[in-house]
Amino acid sequence: MVPDTALPSAPDVSFPELPEALRAAFEAQPEDAVRARLEGFVALTLQRLRAPTSGPMPPPVPARTVALTFDGPLPDQGQPVEHILADIAAHVMPHGRDKRAPTWFAQLDVPPTDISVFSGLLIRALAQDPITFSSARSGTFVEQQVLRWLTSLAFPDTPTAGGCFTSGGTQSNFQALLLLRNHCLLRAGADVNALGLFEALTRTGHRGMRVFASEASHPSIFAAVRQLGLGDAGLHRLPADGEDRVSLEALEAALAGARREGHLPAVVVLTAGTSGVGAVDPLRAGMRLAREYGALVHVDAAHGSMLLFSQRHQGLLDGLQDADTVTLDPHKVLGLNAPLGGLLVRDARLLTLLGKSSLGYFVAGEVADLGEVTLDGSRALNSLGAWLLLRHFGRDGYGRLVDHLFALAADFTRRLRESGLFELFPEAPAMNLLAFRLVPKARGPRPGDLARENARNEALLSRLLEGRRFAASCYRHASGRLYLRAVFINPASRPEHMAALADALIQLGREAE
Ligand SMILES: *Cc1c(COP(=O)(O)O)cnc(C)c1O
C-alpha cells in the first residue's frame, strides 16, 4: 500500500468567480429582468419604426464629423447597456438613411415591414444555426420549406429541383458559376475538385473555357468569373440592345467563335431584371442558343424574381424554368432586411459539386446538414424571416405588391414622358425602375458632348438630392452615358409621390435649360 504522504498535496485552486454583471448576461434571468433590458431596445426600435417618413430627410452631416464619433479605442472596461443605447440614439440613428420613406427611390430592396424587424429579434433569440441538423433541428425544416416554396415558383413541376440559401445575390451568382464550371468540366470527363482547374481543363483537350454575359449584367458576374480562375479573358462581355437586353446575334457569334478557337463554351449568363434598368434578357431564345453550343445557363433573377409572384407579370420570365441555376434574392424581393440570397437549381445534384464534406462535429443523423451545400459556415436562420413573411403576405399578397410597384413605374414614366424634357431609357420600363436623362442639347456626336451631357445630368441629380425630399440614384450605361435612375420599390409609395418626384425633376430640368 502506498502511504498517503506519497501523493502530492492538491494544489490550492481557487476557482475564479465571474463578476456578477458578466454572469448575469449569460444566465437565464427572471422575466422581469429580461423585460427591463428589452425595453431600451424596444424604445429605439419604436422610435425608428414610428419616425415620420415623408418629410424632408435630415441635413447630411459631413462624413468627417460622423467619423469622429466612432474613432475611440476599444474600451477596457464594460459599459452599461443604457449608455451604449443612448449613443446609438444620438450618433447612429440620426445618420442612417430611411429606406422606409415612400420617397426613397435609390435602391432595389423592398423596405422592411415591422414584422421583418421583429423577426430579426426572434431569429437571434432562437439562435438555430442551419449549418448542421444538430444545431438547427426545426430550423433545417423551416429552411427546406422556404426553399421548396421558392423552387416551386422558379421551377414548377420539377421534382429534381432544389436550392440553398446564400448571403445575397452576389454570393448566389458566384456559387452558381462555380457549380456550373465544375459541372461542365465533369461532363467533359474531368473532376475539378480532384484535379484542379488547370489539369481538368487540359484533360478535356480545351485551350480554355468561356462564360458569356451581357455588359448590362450585375458586376458580381464579372467578379465571379475572375474569382473562379477564368480571368477577364474567360469572359465574353456581350453588347446589349437598345433596351439593355443581351444581343442574341452577339451571343451566337461569341459561342461560335469560342468553339472555333478550341474553348469550352461553359456558361451563358442571362439576366432577368438588370440592376441598371430592369431589363429582362430574352430567356427562351438565349437558352436555345446556349443549348445548341452545349453551354449551361445561369439566370440572374436577383431582382426579377419578384415577377414570379405576380399573375399579371410573371409571363416576362417565361423560359426561366429551363435554366440550370437561378439567383433570386429574398432579402431584396421580400423586404426581409437580413442577408438571405437564394440559389435555385433545376437538378439538386448540382449542389454537391461544391466540394464540401460533412463538418464532423456532430454525429451524422438521418437528416441532411445544410452546411454541406452552402459556401457559408455558421450563419443565422434568416430563412425564418422569409418563412414568416411568405406566410403572412402569401403569394397573392406579394403579387399585388409587385403589381403596385409596376403601376408606379408606369405612372412616373408617363409623367416624365409628357414633360418632353427627358429621354427615357428604355422608352417603356420592363420592370419597376427607369433610367432617364435630360434631352441632349445638340443632336449628333461631337467631341466633348458626352462629358458635357453627363455633367448636366450629374448636376441635376445633385440638386435633386440637395432638396432632401427624394433619394434617387444614377446608372452609367456601357456607352458612357450617365442616366438618373429611379426605382419604385416601396409599397408605401403612391401616385402623389410619383407626381411630386416628376414635378421636382421637371422643375429642375427647366432650370437646367
Ligand atoms: C442586387 C443584385 C445583385 C447582387 O445582390 P446582393 O444581394 O446585393 O449581393 C445581383 N444581381 C442583380 C441583378 C441584382 O439586382
Image (tube, rainbow, N blue to C red):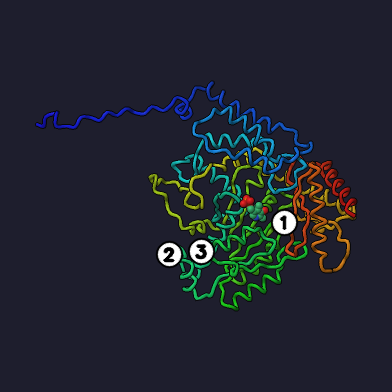
Residue drawn at x 42%, y 46% is 366
Q: Which residue is mark 2?
A: 194
Q: How far separated are the C-alphas under marks 3 and 2? A: 11 Å
Label 2 crowd (10 A; few <14 / some 14-19 / many >=20): few
Q: How far separated are the C-alphas under marks 3 and 1? A: 30 Å
The quarter of the rendered structure image containing the C terminus is: bottom right
Q: Amino acid at mark 3?
A: Asn
Q: Amino acid at mark 1?
A: Gly
Horizontally, residue 439 falls left or right of residue 382, namely: right
Q: Which residue is mark 3?
A: 182
Q: How far separated are the C-alphas under marks 2 and 1? A: 39 Å
- Estimate the x, y position of residue 407 in percent, counting from the top left: 79, 47
- Estimate the x, y position of residue 512 in percent, counting from the top left: 88, 53
Residue drawn at x 71%, y 46% is 399
Residue drawn at x 62%, y 32% is 87
* Residue 152 vertical placement versus 283 (above, below): above
Label 1 crowd (10 A; few <14 / some 14-19 / many >=20): many
Locate residue 155: give its quadrant. Answer: bottom right
User: Can you tell which mark lies on residue 276?
Assistant: 1
Viewer-proximal residue among 119 and 403: 119
* Residue 457 vertical placement versus 37 (above, below): below
First of labels 3, 1 by sequence position: 3
